[in-house]
Amino acid sequence: MNRKTLGKRIREERLRIGLTQEQIAEYIDVSTTYIGFIERGERSVTLEKLILLAECFHVSIDSLLREVSENAYDQKLFEELNFLWDTASAEDRNLIVSVSRVIVNRHNA
């Protein structure tokens, strides 16, 4: 994977969870300028920073590095659902399960 592709994926993940470059920079202990360089593919990311980015985005490192595949969309949905689950309260988790049951039962009827 080239730096531009990785940078684009990092930007997409940052925007997906609604964080600013400043928030990401603070989380991984770098400058905001450096985050901009990474997102534009102008700088490489160290393994240490890549691990922190994956943790921050609630995704696996391989999902950041993986080339786009036929299952990429499903993987993105799965990761988004995991993020929502991880950040939801117990009450909201019950609601997520209830809504999911209604959707599945509607398609199985």
Image: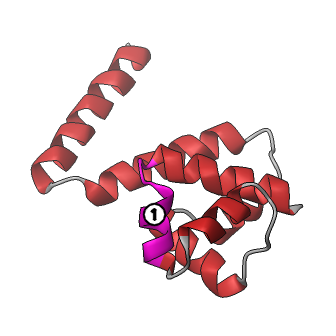
Name the spot of residue 22 as percent of width and height, x first. Answer: 45, 63
Question: Is 73 one of the magenta-colored residues?
Answer: no
The quarter of the image holding the N terminus is bottom right
What secondary structure is found at the residue carrying circle 1?
A: helix
Name the spot of residue 15 as percent of width and height, x first. Answer: 51, 46
Task: Kindly identify the amino acid type of the residue bearing the numbered disc 1.
Answer: Glu
**Is residue 58 visible in this depiction of the protein?**
no
Question: Left or right: where does residue 26 sit relative to residue 74?
Answer: left
The quarter of the image holding the C terminus is top left
Question: Left or right: where does residue 102 sit relative to residue 33?
Answer: left
Which residue sits at x=61%, y=66%? Answer: 33
Say few, some or many: other residues with alpha carbon within 10 Å of mark 1 (under 14 / 14 to 19 / 20 or more): some
Residue extending farthest left: 91
Please give the count of numbered marks on the rendered protein: 1
The residue range painted magenta reads 17-27
Query: Of 72 and 46, which appears nearest the observer?
Result: 46
- The colour scheme used to paint the residues is secondary structure
Residue linked to disc 1: 22
Q: Indicate whether 81 appears above or below 45.
A: above
Which residue sits at x=18%, y=38%? Answer: 95
Question: Left or right: where does residue 29 sit relative to residue 68?
Answer: left
Q: Which quadrant of the structure image shows residue 35?
A: bottom right
Q: Indicate whether 102 appears above or below 106.
A: below
**Is residue 79 visible in this depiction of the protein?**
yes
Name the spot of residue 61 as percent of width and height, x first. Answer: 65, 70
Q: Which quadrant of the structure image shows residue 46?
A: bottom right
Which residue sits at x=51%, y=78%? Answer: 28
Residue extending farthest bottom: 48
